[in-house]
Image (cartoon, helix red, strand yellow):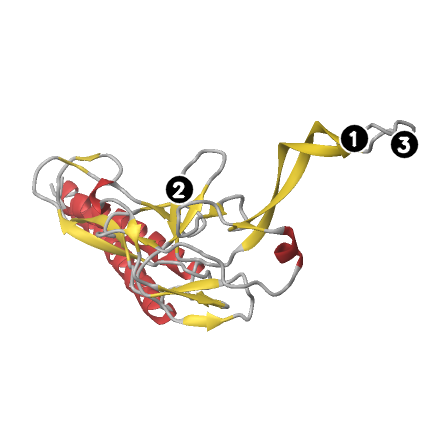
Amino acid sequence: MNISFYTATTGAIQQQDRLDVHANNIANINNFGFRAKQPSFSQLMTGPVTGIEDTLPRGVGARMEDAATDFRQAGLTGTERKLDYAINGSGFFALLDPTTGEISYTRDGSFTLSQMKALETVQIPVEPDPDDPFAEATTRTELQEIDHWYLSDGMGRLVLGKDGARIEVDEATAASTDFPPLPIGIFDFINHDGMRSLGDNRLVPVEKNGGVGFGSGELVQGFLELSNADLATEMSKVIESQRSFQYMLRMITTSDEIETTVNNLR
């Protein structure tokens, strides 16, 4: 069979995957701290190879090798909200999932306060018997639910401070509207390439990123970082992907016409 069938089929599938990447960038263009993905392609060798989804009969054309994360900093926008933070420079905020112990990293600093209850042992004072002149005041031990307020991302994950511990806010501060700057930690890695993306603009490191250390960025209160996806660039890439996809389909149609002509020869 004409090898152009396989070339065009491979190209159409890869352009569809590329279109998905750019569509995701556009969908997140208004999400604070979002990092755009940039697809990259590599040439397929001639011969049987494993394709993006299944084993291809012939390894021809190109395939989308990776969708690398663009870590370039975007602009900051003022919110006048005391629990909003941005990082001017390199680094990430660290988020702890208290249910799994997983630590993920983000550039989205739109934080809030989460109330958590914990059973704690407290000493309750007991008044002495007024009819007993020799009675003394005593205490009794009792388990009570105590409210704690922690800085979180609003999704149940807790923000880590400079010491790597959860940031707890006292009840008086939590009840006020004026928050002093909190000791939020800024963490970073030697190498950002290959960090695995999770939902909610979160990233987790892989082995090649190395160990976590302190970031060099500056903490800015009352600001949030914008998405670094550029709408004009993404729209042009979407149009480019659509045109390439149409070319691939046209190539399949042309190949089919050639095969039909050959088969009709007498």
Question: Mark 2 = which residue?
Answer: 103
Depth order, front residue of 258/207: 207
**Disc 1 packing (10 Å; few <14; some 14–19; many ≥20):** few
Residue sitting farthest toward the left: 46
Question: Mark 3 = which residue?
Answer: 130
Nearest to N terminus: mark 2 or mark 3: 2
* Spatial separation of the CA atoms under disc 1 and disc 2: 50 Å
Question: Mark 1 = which residue?
Answer: 136
* Spatial separation of the CA atoms under disc 2 and disc 3: 56 Å
Q: Amino acid at mark 1?
A: Glu
Q: Quadrant of the N terminus?
A: top left
Depth order, front residue of 136/5: 136
Depth order, front residue of 127/172: 127
Q: Position of residue 236 (x, y in %)?
A: 32, 68
Nearest to N terminus: mark 1 or mark 2: 2
Q: Position of residue 78 (x, y in %)?
A: 49, 72
